[in-house]
Amino acid sequence: MTATISFDRVFDVYDSTRGLPPGISEQVTNTILNIVSPTSETKFFEIGVGTGRIAIPIAKRGYSYTGIDVSEKMLTELHRKLEGISHRLIAVKGDATALQFLDNSFDVGLTVHVFHLVSAWKQALSEIRRILKPGSPYLYTHGTLDSISTNLNNNQGRLTFQQRWEDIIASYGYPLPDYGATEEEVLTELRTQGASLETVIAAQWKWELTVKKLLEDYQNRVYRHSWHLTDDVFAKAIDDLREWALEHYGSLDYDLSSETKFKIVVVRNWA
């Protein structure tokens, strides 16, 4: 199996830290269904299905849905959430670069916040193209959250915070590993392969956040930016981050809330 980041270590907090609010989840589901106009025979497929934040709402509507993920614990959580629900959702452990499905098996393909974690992402794209029926749409979302700081004068949002963290760990000799692709790399590859791309904003909402809450998430190693660090280096780095945050923002109550978008790139004329 090629290098892919597993979310086993955060399966129990994944939904609380990366899940969509109930109303927003419904908006995203409705947008996806409006884009693809499914019938009772439509078969959905998702790489990186995780805990089912995209899959379960669609499966609850009665559609056939197949997903794979490298994390057994994330899949266990997905199956737990499905208990007592009537559905046609199959979720199994699998490798995105070697899918165990026949050519032309599915009508809709999805990936949400995945390809930055897969080193052989071009091979994964090739596999998606192979298993999709000719003319089928592929829905690509690089990052679930596309945030714009509400403090436009200072522009001191999560990205500034993350960049400082990356600078700190790099100073200790542990730069953030470059696992997979950027959004633009994926979109460029799709265009090169002849695909037409359309951007759709499925939902927009305000994400409430303070410096204190973000520090707590980093302290709890919620995000992959710290998973490659040894415990001793992590302890030093988090102290550095806390010291910088207090100096930079002036207060742990500093508002980092952002207007957040769920952006889908609809890929057509490809599969």
Image (spheres, grey):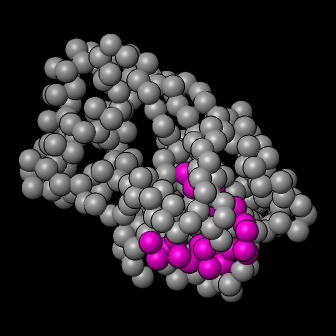
Which residue is outermost to the right? 40
Q: Quadrant of residue 213?
A: top left
Q: Is residue 84 visible?
A: no
Identified at 89% across, 61% down, the residue is 39
Report x, y in % for residue 226: 27, 51
Q: Is residue 24 magenta?
A: no
Q: Does residue 154 lie above or below 162 as drawn?
A: above
Report x, y in % for residue 270: 63, 67
Report x, y in % for residue 106: 73, 73
Q: Which residues are magenta?
A: 122-141
Q: Nearer the viewer, residue 102 or 222?
A: 102
Q: Quadrant of residue 66?
A: bottom right
Q: Is residue 129 magenta?
A: yes
Quadrant containing the N terminus in the rendered view: bottom left
Identified at 44% across, 27% down, the residue is 148
Q: Is residue 24 visible?
A: yes
